[in-house]
Image: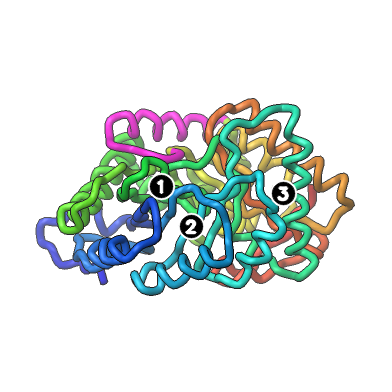
Amino acid sequence: MTVLNSASVSIDIVKFKVRAVTLAIPELNESFIELARKVKETEVRTEIWSYRIALAPTKCSLKLLDRASAFVEEADFDYFSVPLSAEGNLAEICESLSSYENLFASFNVPELELSRIPCLAEKYYQALNSLRKRGDYLTQCRIALVVKGPIETPYFPAAACVSGKPFLTGALLYAKYLYSKGNIIEKIRDAGRTCLKVLTEISCKAGIEVKGVDLSISPWMEESVVPLITSGKRSISLYRILVLNKAIERASAELKSCGFNEIMLPLAEDNELKRLAAEGALRARDFIRFSVACVAGVDMVLLPNAPREKFLEYIEECLAVAFIKNKPIGFRLIYTDAEPGEFIELGKFSSTPVIDF
């Protein structure tokens, strides 16, 4: 368990959390369980919100999922991510994954060809639709379609071990810290340095490389990103998203960084986004617009029951943005049986509104 017990800690540490420490491993074996235990047992100087494990790209099987689930429990970590190819039978994989509440999966597309977008959209639709028919929305929260993946990031479900050897990455929960006055680039940089210090402390005890910190600004419920990207009329501004992403980019260039390094807008994880959606101020198409400027613009978005063609068209539009951006981007949609304006209970993500296309 982490502790806050050092008199030398900067006062800024109490203003944000280390959202995740992610241990990336190339395979499942006993030596990596011991490594994970060393990571978890290292006392550090700030609060760590979650400990996660990411595997190297692999093929899915029930045996693999059983071993991964047992591994994360033995290591006393919180979550485990399995990066898979989008070439497999996504619907079958999702059905298997639904039995493991602590496992996440990414379906990776290393290079997206324009001609393959309809086929890929169909596969993702079939996977989501199979879960929708069973009323399984929580498994949909644990899968993502990742273009230009797999990616070395602490963020789930996209996290993966790509380099072939174990390493550590970290992420921050620091939106509220960035609300306060001061140079935002300096504040992002200072928070990143704090996270890197934590990772370095762990690496020294565990004997493992630090890959870097992902400086992405991601919300969690009342710690919303909306105040950082709204205009005077309280509407989300694409311009402000771009300005903030540029600040993250400048800060990340000065630090050992990895992953996405952009603002994230997961609907189900941000209470202000939920409020705007419930008021009708946000629709599904708005999140496609946001995704032009941010890596997870279409993330944790709850969509209504709709004809197959309409849902497929929405996925195709998401993939079109990915094709245009030509950089790593992830999508996490939740296909429901509800009508726009209804709320769905999503476990730890709490009640979330379904939004119209």
In the picture, the disc for residue 161 is 1
Q: Which residue is mark 2?
A: 81
**Circle 1 SS class:** loop
| Label 2: how many Cα within 10 Å (few below 14, some 14–19, many 20+) | many
Residue 301: percent from the left, percent from the top? 67, 53
Magenta range: 239-260
Residue type, label 2? Ser
Q: How many marks?
A: 3
Residue type, label 3? Tyr
Q: Residue at x 66, y 71 (%)?
A: 345
Res 45 quadrant in image:
bottom left
**Circle 2 SS class:** strand
Labels 3 and 1: the sequence-earlier one: 3
Q: Is residue 47 visible?
A: no
Viewer-nearest residue: 321 or 163: 163
Q: Residue at x 62, y 54 (%)?
A: 300
Viewer-nearest residue: 201 or 191: 201
Labels 2 and 3: the sequence-earlier one: 2
Asked whether disc 2 touches disc 3, contact meaning CB atoms under 8 Å apart, the reply is no
Q: Which residue is mark 3?
A: 124
For the stretch drawn in magenta, the main secondary structure is: helix
Res 70 quadrant in image:
bottom left
In this picture, residue 310 sits left or right of residue 40:
right
Residue type, label 1? Cys
Labels 3, 1: front one = 1
Whether residue 354 appears in magenta in the rendering, the answer is no
